[in-house]
């Protein structure tokens, strides 16, 4: 038992909530969680948002974020109950024995200071190393984490390295003071899949080589399966299941864990293209005003009635720009868009009301896509009023029908967006698009901001609605699991070009071009040893070339 | 819902002043310009605040003066708000050359100190209440314009505004139904502050002799009429000064409370 580093017993954490109506009051958000972590081991904490995983992670430093208080239980680090320690002792603990890697490295680094200064700061301040020793150690860590030019990268400012590199710098920062425990809080969530895999590998190797223990917090079970020894599944502040990775992935006991493991197992039979496409994007090239760089270069894709075209690619590949061109927000500099047998005007202002009605859009962030000062009834009712001139009882009846269609019921009609959950908000946005009786809905990363199970529900709803309303989707996403679940045809975009295009079975069957291969192989799979396999596979590729 | 004590005090005094302003002719014990006693009589049971420099009842002058000051300040605030916010929202939504033209024009106006600008304009124009309201309201609308535009530019890039544009909505729907409701809370809070500046502004102008013209009463004018008395220990000039200060503070307290309340509605923290 002597090698137990972190022991958490019956941890209870509370927070103060400020409801829109009524008095602020305290609630409990973590209800008595217990676990142990041995030296050199990695424990994955997994759950959807609000499960309390970050809160639990931070409690390993006896820290509570704004308004969050640890109300009960014990947290033992290296044989000491840190909840009983004063602020001076905690200060010696934080940043020295226990360190933290946050989700957004870009927001955590000070843009005005060089990377080296920030990476070594805690180690020097805590008296663990002299400046010279700390810098030597940082360079060794940069090297170990696979950063280019480890000797000199520390002299750069945070904005001079890429997002994936910065996240690795942050890992170096956390490892620099030789901590006993590192808390990784969603370190790869904000990265593209192709970058995520490199960072994951670097983190895994660094954990192995330094013998540090880690808490790895994420919502992605496939990711956590690659780096952890044990996994703890959390839901609404309570432990659902706790066990070795192998057991959680291959033999989950609890219903909730089973649902998490089998997420994205939607069965969708691919539909064959019809002779006349609904939407044809013809040789479209586009650039933003005031720039001399084409964001889209000669794009040609078709979308057929009642089908789904998935546009995949990493950030910056131009997929959202394609949506802006189709909707008319950004007139193309070359090429044209044919829709429903007619050519659309390049600019939004010149399009007819009918064109606008038949082409609707759903956004990634449902929060900002709805006016916070309008009720659900107004939000869904406005298209009815605007396009069909519906008023009064007739409108209200149709709103109720739409709410029924999105599986919410008319009790929501007078609610404000702030009173809805993330999944409900996205459903209301779907209803708003459906209200216009469109032929095509552009879905821009509609499930990316949602928890896996909620996202699953939205995808199922979209597929169902497609059957009922015969509406076509242009589905923009970076998530290949989503694509597999719903697409009929796929366009893979890279640096403003479509590099691969065809029916789902064509695009997802070998032989692959280099980029599609990279993209496909980077999607985390829910099996043990996947990460090593991919890296090995990649090495073979580069050796073969 | 609990009203904090500071807002309570603010609401009470603001309400009291507005009540007096509205019902001045019924509340005032004497006529506005009627000389009823000696010069600078001390407070007594017949003249609660004493008399002024030419023997008029000071309480009566204060009541009528409050009516004038508050009426001018309110009208000028409404004028500055309607022009400032409508133009500001328009500039934010339309953008391009309209925005450039309006914004540079506002920059130009703001580069001249408003008091000096007002003094110049009022010295060549006939000084009537209407002219005063117009000059003050338009000068102050530049500040409202700045605020409204800044707030609206942020809101204009939200997805829900884009969604409205994609739906094909006209400008008036976008401005009044999508943007304005979300810009309202900073604007309302600013309204309180602008009102106070108007009270101070009109009082300053009157004190300098270019505001409300005698024999009509207003608080700045009453300070001016009685300022000579101060050297003889006569407090008549201090009464309107205290009134101006208490009105300014109480409106501020109310504005603070409104701002806090409306932002917490959205789940923010002030």
Image (cartoon, coloured by chain):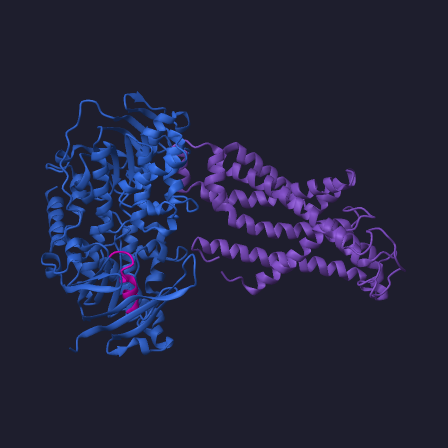
Chain colours: A blue, B purple
Q: Percent from the top left, x then y, of residue A247? A: 10, 61
Q: Nearer the viewer, residue A194 or A381?
A: A381
- Quadrant containing the N terminus of chain A is bottom left
Q: Percent from the top left, x then y, of residue A164? A: 27, 51
Q: Percent from the top left, x then y, of residue A537? A: 11, 48
Quarter of the figure with residue A136: bottom left
Residue A453, compared with residue A279, is above or below; it is below
- Left or right: where A153 falls relative to B82: left
User: Which residue lies at the image location 29% right of the left edge and 70% below the top edge?
Assistant: A12
Q: Is residue A258 visible?
A: yes
- Quadrant containing the C terminus of chain A is top left
User: Which residue lies at the image location 52% right of the left edge and 50% below the top edge?
Assistant: B186
Q: Please, which residue is most extreme toward the top here?
A: A342
Q: Is residue A223 magenta?
A: no
Quarter of the figure with residue B117: top right
- Left or right: where A91 falls relative to A36: right
- Left or right: where B155 falls relative to A423: right
User: Which residue lies at the image location 72% right of the left edge and 61% below the top edge?
Assistant: B242
Q: Is residue A50 magenta?
A: yes
What residue span does the magenta drawing correspond to?
A: A48-60
The mark total stands at 0
Q: Nearer the viewer, residue B219 or A87?
A: B219
Residue A127, compared with residue A417, is above or below; it is below
Q: Is residue A445 visible?
A: no
Q: Percent from the top left, x then y, of residue A277? A: 22, 25
Q: Nearer the viewer, residue A542 or B38?
A: B38
């Amino acid at each position: 038992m002597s090698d137990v580093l972190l022991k958490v017993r019956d941890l209870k954490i509370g927070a103060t909530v400020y409801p829109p109506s009524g008095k602020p009051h305290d609630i409990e958000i973590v209800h008595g969680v217990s676990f142990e972590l041995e030296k050199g081991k990695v424990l994955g904490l997994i759950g959807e948002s609000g499960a309390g995983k970050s809160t639990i992670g931070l409690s390993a430093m006896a820290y509570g974020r704004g308004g969050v208080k640890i109300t009960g239980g014990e947290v033992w680090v290296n044989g000491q109950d840190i909840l009983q320690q004063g602020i001076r002792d905690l200060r010696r603990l934080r940043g020295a024995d226990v360190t933290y890697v946050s989700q957004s490295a870009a927001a955590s680094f000070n843009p005005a200071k060089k990377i080296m200064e920030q990476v070594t700061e805690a180690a020097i301040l805590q008296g663990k190393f002299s400046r010279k020793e700390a810098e030597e150690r940082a360079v060794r860590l940069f090297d170990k984490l696979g950063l280019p030019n480890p000797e000199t990268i520390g002299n750069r400012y945070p904005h001079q390295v890429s997002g994936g590199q910065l996240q690795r710098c942050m890992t170096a920062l956390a490892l620099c003071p030789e901590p006993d425990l590192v808390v990784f809080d969603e370190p790869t969530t904000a990265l593209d899949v192709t970058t995520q895999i490199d960072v994951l590998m670097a983190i895994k190797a660094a954990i192995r080589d330094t013998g540090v223990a880690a808490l790895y917090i994420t919502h992605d079970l496939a990711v956590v399966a690659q780096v952890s020894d044990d996994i703890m599944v959390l839901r609404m502040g309570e432990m659902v299941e706790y066990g070795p990775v192998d057991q959680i992935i291959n033999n989950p006991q609890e219903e909730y864990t089973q649902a998490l493991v089998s997420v994205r197992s939607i069965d969708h039979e691919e539909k064959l293209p019809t002779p006349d496409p609904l939407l044809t994007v013809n040789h479209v090239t586009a650039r933003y005003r005031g720039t001399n760089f084409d964001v889209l270069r000669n794009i040609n894709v078709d979308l057929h009635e009642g089908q789904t075209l998935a546009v995949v690619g990493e950030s910056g590949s131009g997929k959202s720009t394609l949506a802006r061109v189709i909707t008319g927000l950004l007139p193309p500099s070359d090429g044209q868009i044919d829709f429903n047998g007619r050519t659309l005007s390049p600019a939004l202002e010149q399009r007819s009301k009918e064109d606008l009605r038949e082409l609707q859009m759903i956004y990634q962030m449902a929060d900002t896509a709805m006016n916070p000062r309008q009720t659900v009834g107004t939000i869904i009712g406005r298209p009815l009023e605007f396009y069909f001139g519906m008023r009064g009882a007739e409108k209200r009846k149709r709103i109720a029908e739409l709410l029924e269609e999105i599986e919410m019921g008319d009790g929501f009609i007078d609610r404000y967006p702030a009173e809805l959950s993330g999944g409900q908000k996205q459903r209301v946005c779907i209803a708003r698009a459906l209200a216009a009786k469109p032929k095509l809905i552009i879905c821009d990363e509609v499930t990316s901001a949602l928890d896996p199970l909620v996202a699953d529900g939205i995808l199922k709803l979209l597929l169902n609605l497609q059957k009922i309303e015969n509406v076509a989707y242009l589905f923009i996403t970076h998530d290949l699991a989503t694509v597999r679940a719903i697409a009929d045809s796929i366009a893979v975009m890279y640096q403003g070009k479509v590099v691969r295009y065809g029916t789902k079975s064509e695009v997802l069957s070998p032989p692959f071009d280099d980029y599609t291969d990279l993209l496909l192989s980077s999607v985390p799979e829910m099996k043990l040893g996947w990460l090593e396999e991919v890296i090995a596979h990649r090495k073979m590729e580069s050796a073969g070339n | 819902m609990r009203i904090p004590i500071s807002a309570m005090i603010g609401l009470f005094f603001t309400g009291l002043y507005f009540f007096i302003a509205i019902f001045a002719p019924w509340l005032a014990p004497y006529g506005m310009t009627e000389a009823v006693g000696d010069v600078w009589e001390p407070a007594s049971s017949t003249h609660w605040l004493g008399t002024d420099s030419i023997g008029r009842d000071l309480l009566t002058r204060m009541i009528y003066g409050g009516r004038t000051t508050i009426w001018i300040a309110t009208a000028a605030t409404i004028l500055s708000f309607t022009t400032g916010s409508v133009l500001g929202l328009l500039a934010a939504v339309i953008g391009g050359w309209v925005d450039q033209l309006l914004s540079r024009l506002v920059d130009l106006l703001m580069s001249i100190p408003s008091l000096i600008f007002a003094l110049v304009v009022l010295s060549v124009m006939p000084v009537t209440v209407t002219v005063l309201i117009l000059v003050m309201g338009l000068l102050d609308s530049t500040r409202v314009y700045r605020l409204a535009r800044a707030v609206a530019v942020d809101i204009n890039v939200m997805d829900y505004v884009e969604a409205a544009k994609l739906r094909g909505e006209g400008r008036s729907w976008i401005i009044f139904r999508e943007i304005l409701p979300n810009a309202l809370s900073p604007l309302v809070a600013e309204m309180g502050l602008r009102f106070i500046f108007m009270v101070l502004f009109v009082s300053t102008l009157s004190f300098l002799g270019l505001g409300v013209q005698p024999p009509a009463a207003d608080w700045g004018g009453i300070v001016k009429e009685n300022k000579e008395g101060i050297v003889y220990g006569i407090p008549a000039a201090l009464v309107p000064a205290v009134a101006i200060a208490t009105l300014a503070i109480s409106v501020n307290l109310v504005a603070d409370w409104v701002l806090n309340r409306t932002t917490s509605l959205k789940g923010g923290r002030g």
